[in-house]
Amino acid sequence: MSKPLTRFFAGLIAVVALAGCGVASASPPGGGAAAISPRVTDPVVTAQALLEEFFAALVARDQVAMNRILSPAFQIERSDGSHATKAEYVANMPGVSAGPIDVIEAYYDRGALSVKYLANVTTTIDGVPFTSTQPRLAAWHFARARWQMLTLANFNRAT
């Protein structure tokens, strides 16, 4: 083998070896495999399924399911200005019944899903049932091999 060809193959082997080092160093702490973001071909369909799962757990007041659905970094901001973290929300889930959920827009990028939707919800406030279809925003990220809700924001309709 000629010297230039030998140098070429030696250089190629060095590049491949260095590239392998980069992959190994990209592993998360603890040595586990990184969660691979799912392939989302239709963000609206994905958002609809995630919202239905969330509202099913909420209506049932299923704390186990809600703990799985919500990210440890979850926050909610309500239309009345009140706020809750995951622990506060799961401990004090509101009693609601939910009607149709209408996803208006959903956007996906590299493991993050941002959703604008309307949900017809009935809840009891000060002993009086109150039904509204208010605009809402939610965001999910793909972590721990599943989708988890990061944020939820409720808004009053303009009057």
Image (spheres, grey):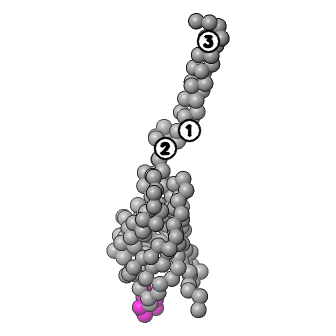
Above or below, comparing residue 156 to residue 106 in the picture: below
The kind of secondary structure element at disc 2 is loop
Which residue is tagged 3? 5
| Label 3 residue SS | helix
Circles 3 and 1: CB atoms closer than 8 Å = no
> Mark 1 sits on what residue?
26
Using the image as rendered, state which of residue 156 and residue 2 is in the foreground.
Answer: 2
Residue range corresponding to the magenta coloring: 123-129
Q: Earlier in the sequence, mark 1 or mark 2?
A: 1
- The residue depicted at 42 percent of the width and 85 percent of the height is 123
Q: Which residue is pictured at 56% across the width and 80% down the height? A: 155
Q: Are marks 1 and 2 in contact (CB under 8 Å)?
A: yes
Q: Quadrant of residue 41?
A: bottom left
- Amino acid at dot 1: Ala
Q: Position of residue 125 (x, y in %)?
A: 46, 89
Q: Secondary structure at mark 1?
A: loop
How far is disc 1 from disc 2 in space, using C-alphas? 8 Å
Q: Amino acid at mark 2?
A: Ala
Task: Estimate the spatial distance between the alpha carbons at disc 3 and disc 2, rounded to whole Å.
Answer: 38 Å
Residue 85 visible to an observer of this rendering: no
At label 3, the amino acid type is: Leu
In this image, 43 relative to 157: left or right?
left
Q: Position of residue 158 (x, y in %)?
A: 59, 88
Residue neighbourhood size for the residue with mark 1, other residues' Cα within 10 Å, grouped as few (<14), some (14–19), many (≥20): few
Nearest the eye: 41 or 145: 41
Q: Position of residue 78 (x, y in %)?
A: 55, 78
Which residue matches tag 2? 34
Residue at horizontal 59%, vertical 80%? 81
